[in-house]
Each structure stands twice: as C-alpha cells, then as structure tokens.
Image (cartoon, rainbow, N blue to C red):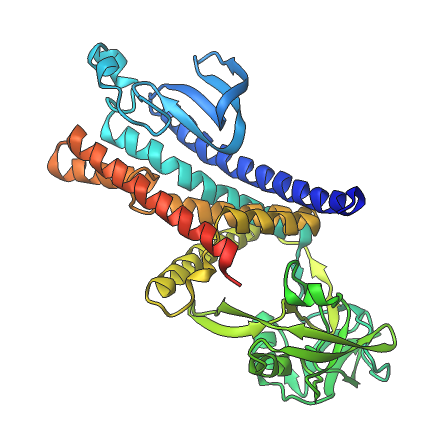
Amino acid sequence: MELAGILPQFGNFAFTIAAFVVALSVIVAIHEYGHYIVGRWSGIHAEVFSLGFGPVVWSRHDKHGTKWQLAALPFGGYVKFLGDSSAASGKDGEMISSLSDAELRRTMHGAPLWARFATVLAGPVFNFILSIIVFAGLALATGVASYPPVIETVHQLPSDEYGVRAGDRLIAINGMDITNVDDFSKVAEALPDTRTLDYTVERDGGQTTVVGPPLSPPRVGHVTPGWAAEAAGLLEGDVILSVGGQEVFEFGQMIPIINGTKGAATNYSIWRNGEIIGITIAAQKRDLPKADNSFDTRYIIGISGGMFYTPAVESIGLGKAVVAGGERTWGIITQSLSGLYHMITGSISSCNMSGPIGIAKVSGQMASQGVESFIFFIALLSAAVGLLNLFPIPVLDGGHLVFFAYEAITGKPPSDKALRIMMTTGLALILSLMVFAVSNDLFCP
C-alpha cells in the first residue's frame, strides 16, 4: 500500500486515540480528585495523585506534601494514601505498625470508618456531579424549546406546497390544541399516518389553518458515525422516499419495514436537493432501550429523524438546568442497570457491552461531530464510570464500601488474609470482564 493510502487511516486512528485519552483523562481526573479532596477534608493524607500509570514524566509536590504526577500511560490514574502499599490501596502493614496514633489517623487504614467511607464514595459521586454539571451547562447553552412551539426554520422537503412557514406559532394540529410539552407529546402520538396535516398557527397577530407535512417526515436528522447509513453515503437532510420498494411519507413507517429486512441489503430511494438517487443499505441488529427501561431488539441503519421544522428555543434558569442535568444523569444510571439486567437474564445480546476498543471508537466519532457532542459523551461516560465503580466487586470502590459495611455491622474489618483473597478474586473478575468486553469489540457485529 502506498503512503498516501496509509496516512488518512493513521490520521483517523491517531484522532480516535487522542479523543479517547482526553475523555478518559477528564473522567479519571475528576474521579480521583473526589477521592483526594474528600480524603484531605477527612484528615487522610494523600502521598501521590497520579494521572496515568508507568514511568513518571512530570511531577511536583504541593504544600500539603502530596506528589502530583503525570505518567506515561494515560489510561487511568490513582491516589495513593498514607499507609497504602500500592496504587490499589493495599495495606502496608510494616509501615503502619511503626506509626504513632496521630500518624495512624492520617492513613486510610487508621482513619475513622466515616472518613474512609466518605473518601471512597467520593470518587463515583464526583463522576455523577461532573455529568450533572455538563448536562446542566449544555441545557443553559442551548436552551429548551418554547411551548406552544414556534417554528424557527422549515426543513426542505420534496413538496413545496405546504403553508407553514418560519415564525409561525403552532396552536393546534388536526384540531388538537397544544399549550405545553405534555400536550405536544399526546398530540404527536395521536396523529394519523397521513401525507398532510392541518396546522392551526398564530401568524401576524391572528390565527389561520394551513396544510403542512407530517410532523415527523422521513427526513434524516442525524447520521450516526460508524453505522450502515454512513457507510452507504446517507446524509443529514436526505429525505427517504421508499424502502425496499415500499413508499414512506412518515419517519415511523420505516421502523417495521427496516426491521423486516432482517439485515439484508435493501434499496432506498432518496430525495436529495431536488434529485432522486438510489442507495443500498444493510441494517444492523441492535437492542434499543425504551422509555420504561426495557429493550426492543430491532434492525436499524443508524439514523434519527425529527420534526419538519427546527423549533425556536428559550433560555432556562440555573435551577431548571440543574434539575434537567440530574434527570439525565439518573436516566443514564437506570438505563445502564436495566441493560445489565437484561444481558444477565439473556433478554438482550451480551454484544451490548462495549470494551475499551468500542469506547475509543465512539470517542473519536463523537469528537468528529464537534465539541458539544464530545462534551456530551464525556458526561455520559462519566455517569457510566461512576456507576461501574459502585458495583460490589473487590478492587472497585463498591467493594471497599462493602468491606466498610461489614466493619460497621461486626465492629471489625475483614482479616488481612480475607482481604487479600477477595481482592485477588475481584481483580480476576475485572480482568475476565475486560477480556469479554474486548472480545465483544472485536467479534460482535
């Protein structure tokens, strides 16, 4: 292969790795800082705060005596507290036995139970806080749609005979009134699958009823990178006229048709800027989450639709933005737990579990879509990492919290021998899950 053919591939690979390292570094830094700062507030001394593993490339000591460092392998990080034998928080028994009572209080192993519990819990909590802040910030920056909705722009469609236009405020659709977001959702669900709808709009100080397209026409609003639609050349703004010879005029009509293809290569008729072209796409099988946190197994091509117009937005206050950020973070947590449950029970494919290769790939894809998409992905991944660390597996934060709960109930911690066995078992389990996830990245369709 010539160098000219290799360079673009290398560039894409380097971009993907860089995006993955940036996303992971932000999440790890926030997670470990949570451990560090709450530990410091609780009187536990941190000897080392490391971003990355392996040979140290930069370091400095702060006024508290903590060594802050960057290591050569930027795929994780750790905080080593006084009394720890390693980055995995193992107990340095020889060192601890030589400490005075005052010095012992400054170690993770000699601190009160509440201080240890708070310090360990802080890592995942800080990941959740990062997600809430980012989602709230995005809500503040982008605003939310106003209701009744105002049309900011009307998307280009094959027919130009519709009467709706930019600046119209939608008062009703097919005689069904719209006053708030709940009304809009109910109206959208009740609309018939017809080629046109009657829109009552407020325009120039008065009201009029005009004919418009389906609320959600088969227009491509977004193409997901790495999926079949992108590979086939489908573009944002394309309008799908037919799938496998079946005419469609509403986005929802495509779902059963595409699902019925069972992944076979299918012809699509596309309207693009006044021209009609043909594209062949083979849908991919995926388990998709539903609103009730159950899953629906479908064949999809990797596109999303939208309404025939772009709605005008209005700014929201900080309080509402934080609530929206919290709701979105909670949604990620509940959806992740639901997905795990359905994989364990066999309701959905275990291929839904991604490993580092899959996450790195998505990092690059999201970064290629722009800063906002990449920041959104960091927030989503941060919530997932926070949840993962709460699983009751030794070596993870959740495992340590279980040990602390045992100590609170029995009045004494597990023995050092028991801890070593459980930590070894936990490490073996994590490594097994990692191998399983990487195999998914390599072999799942």
* Picture layout, residue 404 above or below residue 190: above
Classify 162 as above or below 120: below
Position of 114 with respect to 306 (left or right) is left
Number of marks in picture: 0
| Residue depicted at x 38% and y 63% | 343
Check the image and report above or below for 411 versus 68.
Answer: below
Seen from the viewer's position, the closer of residues 87 and 383 is 87
Horizontal side of 248 relative to 297 (left or right) equals right
Q: Measuring from the top left, give residue 378's x and y in whole percent.
A: 56, 45
Whether residue 162 is visible here, answered yes or no, is yes
Q: In the picture provided, is 374 more to the left or to the right than 99?
A: right
Quadrant housing residue 115 = top left
Q: Quadrant of residue 93?
A: top left
Taking the spot 62% from the left edge, 85% from the top edge, the residue there is: 191
Q: In this view, does 123 lie above or below 361?
A: above
Q: Residue at x 54, y 47 (%)?
A: 379
Q: Residue furthest front?
A: 1
Q: Where is residue 73 in the image (x, y as percent from the top left)?
A: 52, 29
**How far across and how far down the image is residue 51, in percent?**
50, 28
Q: Which of 270 and 131 is in front in this view?
A: 270
Can residue 390 be seen at all in this image of the molecule?
no
**Residue located farthest toward the left when viewing the structure as drawn:** 410
Q: Residue at x 29, y 46 (%)?
A: 392
- Quick one: 259 or 118, which is closer to the camera? 259
Find residue 21 and report its image quarter: top right
